[in-house]
Amino acid sequence: MNSRAQTAQAVQSNEEIEAFARKLLDRVGVYGKPPTPEAAIIAVASLVKHGELDLEAERASLLKQFGAALISGLKKIQGLLDLRERVIFVTSDLHEKRKPFVAFHEVGHSVIPWQRDVLCRGDDNLSLSPNTKQLFEAEANSFAANLIFQVDAFDNEAKDCSFAIQTPILLADRYGASYHSALRRYVERHESPCALLILGQAIQVVGQSRKLGHVRYIVSSKQFKGQFGHPEWPHVLGGQTVNGRVGTLVEIPRAQGQVLLRDLDGNERAFLCERWTNQFETFLMLRPIRTKRKLFAPRIVLISGSDLKDEEGKA
């Protein structure tokens, strides 16, 4: 299958998954009334959540007990679905805001018909091909996100608010979502060209007041990709080591800064960069500057920018 056919199939799949999630929300009667109630969704899907287990500690016994069950998580088990018994398990050591997502992810494996048909035949995570497993996990993640953000309800609320990094932060609590997932969904589905850089913890530059962060990955809106593709981000000090680490680094502004990017036509555009930080990560959201005010000096710089990858470039 060529890339164009794969893209068309992915779009069709995403539209179908949104429709499945919307149907479930309507059956529960909670569309437009966040947060989405976990217990009601699980019940309407004819499933039962059997408490919380330390799945990682009991991996061997669970694999033996649930030979046909789908184990979620490629590196660490977070949830488990037994379609024979219609039972969901969620690991106990997850952050509270992560647990509903994992539960909804398992509901997705049960509700998405082509996944249910395959799993009911006895195929499990041990017998599925790597490509099928990856596809099933991505589809279940999409289904879970659509339940959390109630398909387009989050988007519609966001449109009525300011175009700013604080908008998804404020809406996250209302939808029971993590700040990370709210920021990502806000940018990916925004109608304007914008991008989000997700950084690890800040690194203090020795002998200087500025801080840098390693770029974990980047997400952007469809409009951003159409106008800018995958740009070469501004960078300086290529290849230098900071605190013993070499890689893609971005300077973190104290509050906001500016970055200049060239679009696919070669025109230079100015973006405002807003920062939001929690104890684990730093997020930099780039949105276009629409006014004709005097531009101030760029503050966002990358070190070793050739290593930069966006989400599509991840393994």
Image: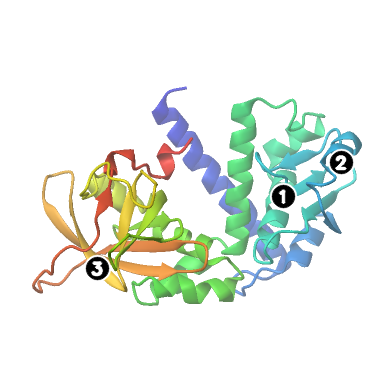
Cα–Cα span, label 2 and label 3: 50 Å
Q: Which residue is mark 3?
A: 257
For the residue marked with disc 2, what is the amino acid? Leu
Would residue 188 be visible to someone looking at this image?
Answer: no
**Quadrant of res 119:** top right
Residue 29 shown left or right of residue 39 in the figure: left
Give the labeled residue for mark 1. 78
Quick one: 25 or 248, which is closer to the camera? 248
Badge 1 element = loop
Across and down, in percent, residue 39 comes to 78, 66
User: Residue at the location (20% across, 67% down)?
Assistant: 289
Q: Residues within 10 Å of mark 3 (few under 14, many from 20)?
A: many
**Mark 2: which secondary structure?**
helix
Is 45 or 275 nearer to us in this picture? 275
Q: Position of residue 117 (x, y in %)?
A: 75, 34
Residue type highlighted by circle 3: Gly
